[in-house]
Structure formats: C-alpha cells, structure tokens
C-alpha cells in the first residue's frame, strides 16, 4: 500500500492527517483534520503512484523527477511555486538571506551538472553501489542539490522508496527502503 508510508512521511513536515482521513478524503468525504493537510497527503500518494507507473517506461532521471514534482505540488502547499520546474534562483534553508542561512544549496546554474552526477550514480556509473547505500546517498545528494523552490523534502523522501522497490524475497541489501526521517551529507561529484 502506497498511502500509509506517505501519511507518515508527511507528518515529518507537521501535516496532521491519518490514513483514515486520507481514505475518507479520497472517496469524497470530509476528513477530521484541515483539508490542506489531507490534500497534501493525497498529492503525495498521487505522486508516488505516478512515479511507480512511469519508472517502468522511463529511467529515473531529471525528467521523471520533474514529472513527479509536478504531481506532488499540483494542489495545495507549493502549487504556486512552479511545480515540475527546476528553480531559476538561489534558495536557502533558515535565515532570511543566503548570508545567514543554515544551508545554501548550489546556485541554479549548477543544478543540471549536479543532477547529471546524481543520475550517473543512480545508474551505477562509475561503480555499482548496494541498493540500501544508494538510496541513502541519493536522498542526501538530492536534498543537497535542492533543485525546486518548494517540495524538495517531500520529493526527496519519495526518491528513497519509489525507484528502489524490489520483490519481497530479495536479499537484505536490496530490500526496499522505508525511512521516517533522514540525516544529511554530501556526495562529492
């Protein structure tokens, strides 16, 4: 089931929606929490579903991540921040400007280079990486690039799970990754 992990992931950002709220919303009922919270989780489920379908047809790439981002931010929080489009300006986390920010990602003109290095890594270039390690490092690198104006955390958490789904009887080092929280580090390109 795609919905339950998305409910938990959304709670990281303070979204107050349970699985029953989401299911009630999806069938046209009124949820017991603010509608914007349930809409956000519903978008999350739709984005994950879209990504799982599309990854069968196209490789994990900037193109696919932009598509998933567009679905993720199609309604509600972030819908006015150019969903599906890479940022064209500098963003930052914390503070009121890059000079006093907690974190400043690469400038907008470096996003394609950074994404190119990430895509190569995802596709085992230069070296094959165990899946669990790849999921963690890909997530950290994506968050470091911070390629969109909004929704980077939500999309980053989707990145951990969606492209790495494998059969249940697979060895542990290839098992699907489900994370409720993450830390940060940087992969040198």
Image (cartoon, rainbow, N blue to C red):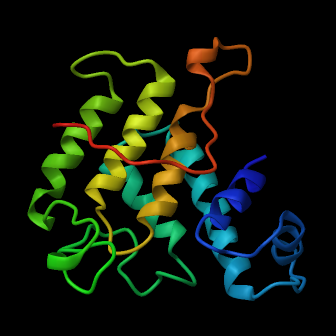
Foreground residue, 61 or 153?
Answer: 153
Quarter of the rendering containing residue 66: bottom left
Q: Is residue 68 left or right of residue 98?
A: right
Which image quadrant: the C terminus? Answer: top left
Q: Is residue 166 above or below residue 113?
A: above
Q: Residue at left 37%, top 82%?
A: 81
Quarter of the rendering containing residue 107: bottom left
Which percent across, then down, holds residue 80? Answer: 42, 87
Q: Residue at left 86%, top 82%?
A: 31
Q: Residue at left 32%, top 72%?
A: 93
Which percent across, then down, holds residue 124? Answer: 31, 22
Quarter of the rendering containing residue 171: top right
Q: Residue furthest left?
A: 109
Q: Residue at left 22%, top 62%?
A: 105
Which percent across, then down, holds residue 55? Answer: 49, 40
Q: Is residue 89 visible?
A: no
Q: Is residue 113 left or right of residue 48?
A: left
Q: Is residue 164 above or below residue 167?
A: below
Q: Is residue 108 left or right of residue 103?
A: left
Q: Is residue 171 visible?
A: yes
Q: Is residue 22 left or right of residue 186?
A: right
Query: How many marks can you see?
Result: 0
């Amino acid at each position: 089931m795609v919905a339950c992990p998305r409910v938990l992931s959304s709670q990281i950002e303070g979204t107050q929606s349970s699985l029953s709220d989401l299911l009630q919303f999806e069938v046209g009922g009124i949820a017991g929490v603010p509608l914007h919270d349930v809409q956000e989780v519903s978008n999350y489920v739709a984005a994950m579903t879209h990504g799982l379908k599309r990854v069968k047809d196209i490789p994990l790439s900037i193109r696919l991540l932009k598509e998933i981002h567009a679905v993720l931010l199609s309604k509600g929080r972030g819908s006015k921040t150019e969903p599906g489009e890479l940022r064209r300006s500098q963003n930052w986390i914390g503070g009121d400007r890059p000079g006093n920010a907690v974190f400043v990602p690469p400038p907008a003109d470096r996003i394609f280079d950074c994404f190119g290095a990430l895509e190569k890594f995802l596709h085992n270039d230069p070296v094959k990486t165990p899946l669990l390690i790849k999921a963690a490092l890909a997530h950290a690198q994506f968050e470091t690039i911070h390629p969109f104006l909004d929704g980077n955390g939500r999309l980053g958490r989707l990145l951990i799970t969606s492209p790495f789904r494998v059969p249940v009887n697979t060895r542990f080092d290839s098992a699907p990754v489900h994370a409720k929280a993450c830390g940060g580090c940087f992969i040198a390109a």
